[in-house]
Amino acid sequence: MAKLILEEGGARRAFRFKEGKLTVGSGEGCTLTLTSPGVEELHATLVIKGGRAVLSTSAGAEPPRMNGRPVAERVELPAECSFTIGDATFELHADEGESASAAAGGAKRPAVRKQAAPSTRPAPRAGSRGPARKTTSRDADTGDRPERVTARRREVKAGMPTWVLMLLLLGGAVGIVFGVKAFFDASNTASFDPGAQLADAVTAINKAQYLAAETALDKFDGVADQATDAQKQKARELRAVIAESGKASTRQGVLDRATQVLDAKLKKFVDQRLAGNLANRARARVFVMRCQEFRKLYPDHPEIDWVNRYEARFAEMAQMDEPRTLEDLQYEVETCTWTATGRRYDQVFKAIDEFLEYAEGGDREAALALRDEKLAERQAHQVDRMQEIRYRWEKGETGKAMAHFVYHLKWWGDEEMENQVAAEITKLGGFPEWLRSFKKSAPEDFDVIVKNRYVREVAEREGLL
């Protein structure tokens, strides 16, 4: 039997199961539906069979992470491990018997009942009367039949007074009650001993099971009045270790997102739009702007040298020191999609307004028409965005819903329209729990969206600031 512990949004849930298939995602059809950001409708499948646990990631979904690193598309999990899917954290524990079976190479087989030895008594001749059926049955089941029960019945029938029997039964019941009470008292004393909880926390940290370590330290806090000063200091040190591991995990998450941006927005752009005769000034300008944005957001990325090298390669063609032409502007607006969630309207209108400061004649008329087109597009998308967020939220696809919400607050480019969406979304049931989880998983984006007054009100009320 395996035990799976899930933590998301500050809540913990535990599940026990022997063998079977568990689907994980944000969709209602999944066995385990998650509400954390970054979870696809069907994100992964966990199969436990024959003492083995295999985790498979759905096509197109972000790989689960173990110890801060993405795992393969299909991976066999250790008997004791922790991993994350989106912003949800899982811990897998195998019972001792199960772990031992797996280590031995297979599950336990059911015990086989010992067969009675064949009788040495000669078989009766035809027509002769064999032994009585009752006697034969007792001979065949020797060693299996608890004959002492029959003996006790005979003794009672022999004349034991009923009141004596009742006293014996009552005395046995009282003994059982006191025995059970003593057992649980001893168990409680042991399980909530400060030293035992510290030992559990250390063991969990050594296995990188930080949620289990926090649980052990929470129990320690409950009996801290019984702890020594040295034990209290040790608990503080262990919490510092857990906090540092959380920071490391967050840094790894930022690094992973940066790598995705590098591949999708820079390397792919070079391959598809700047290779060979495809390169021109308008495309080179967009690429250089993306390199500048990437370096600003992720200056410590391991591949920052690649960014610098390719930016220098196309800098002369881009001619960034010269003002935009109409062709430059039109291509920049067309490709102004830093995120896959939607267009960056903040940059779109900034570029158009800068061009209008010096444009004349037909170029100016074309730019004004482009501005009106994008204003109408953004207004139409405002309604669509609200409906999309509500639909995803009500469907249980919290990750997708809030990805749209975060995008809206970061890149919509109109404070009044941002407030219209935020005023409604912050009223959704469960929003405070999501915001608490989001602060832990994406602290940089949290700092951006909390500038909105509606989000800030929730954050202050929940003690997140």
Image (cartoon, rainbow, N blue to C red):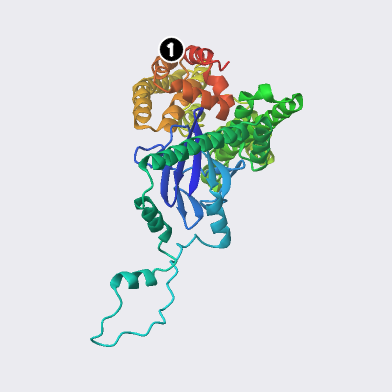
Q: Which residue is mark 1?
A: 416
Viewer-side residue, 455 vs 31: 31
Residue 422 found in image quarter: top left
Q: Which residue, as the protein is rendered here, is positioned at the far bottom?
A: 125
Residue type indicated by callout 1:
Glu
**Residue, x 45% and y 69% (percent of image)?**
114
119, above or below 367, in the image: below
Left or right position of 200 against 96: right
Left or right position of 63 against 318: left
Left or right position of 33 against 268: left
Residue 203 found in image quarter: top right
Residue 83 found in image quarter: top right
Q: Which residue, as the protein is rendered here, is positioned at the far right?
A: 230
Viewer-side residue, 380 vs 174: 174
Q: Which residue, as the protein is rendered here, is positioned at the far front?
A: 159
Q: Which residue, as the protein is rendered here, is positioned at the far left?
A: 127
